[in-house]
Image (cartoon, rainbow, N blue to C red):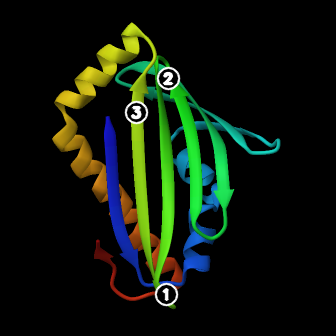
Amino acid sequence: MKLSANEDIEAPIDAVFRAVTDFDFFERTALRRGVEVSRTEGTMPHWKLGFEYRGKARTLEADLLELQAPSTVKFRGKMGGIFGDLDVELVPLSKNRTRLSVATDLKAQSLTGKLLLQSLKLAKTKITKRYKKRVGSFAADVEKRLGGGAMHSA
């Protein structure tokens, strides 16, 4: 299952890249939402997140695969029988305007994962709407933190 969203942010690409790669900020945000977070530093960071979803304890493991300033950040995560890639791409539209493109591709590795992914596909319209809203909210927050102007969906 693939999800994607694009947002234009009134800020220079270097500033947006710093916001996208502010892992401490994302960890603090997750902790405030009750997620257990641990990060292991190596060549590239690895995260282990523990949280409750639909009444069950879940564990998500994620690795940073690629970090290419100021344009590309790629992650791979695994939870149960599902794994997914999260790709963030930044494109400068002008000196003070950057396009943020976020794409997630989820795939199943097991029967349990296939069943879960199938149920997600049945709710794809709702999930896509929520995904785009979250990316838009993140872009608006980045603009606000960086003191930019109005943000527009691409």
Quadrant for the N terminus in the image: top left
Left or right, 48 with respect to 131, comes to right
Cα–Cα gap, marks 3 and 2:
17 Å
- Element carrying mark 3: strand
* Name of the residue lying farthest toward the top: 111
Q: Looking at the image, is mark 3 or mark 1 earlier in the sequence?
A: 3
Q: Categorize mark 2 by other alpha carbons within 10 Å: few (<14), some (14-19), many (20+).
A: few
Q: Which residue is mark 3?
A: 106
Q: Which residue is mark 1?
A: 147
Amino acid type of the residue tagged 2 in the rendering: Arg
**In the rendered image, which quarter is residue 136 located in?**
bottom left
Determine if residue 24 is in view.
no
Are the residues at dot 3 and dot 2 in contact (C-beta closer than 8 Å)?
no
Looking at the image, is mark 3 or mark 2 nearer the viewer?
Answer: 3
Give the residue displayed 62% in from the left and 70% down from the top. 70
Q: Is residue 21 above or below residue 45?
A: below
Please provide percent x and percent y for residue 2: 33, 41
Q: Is residue 96 above or below residue 45?
A: below
Give the residue displayed 29% in from the left and 56% down from the top. 132
Q: Which residue is mark 2?
A: 58
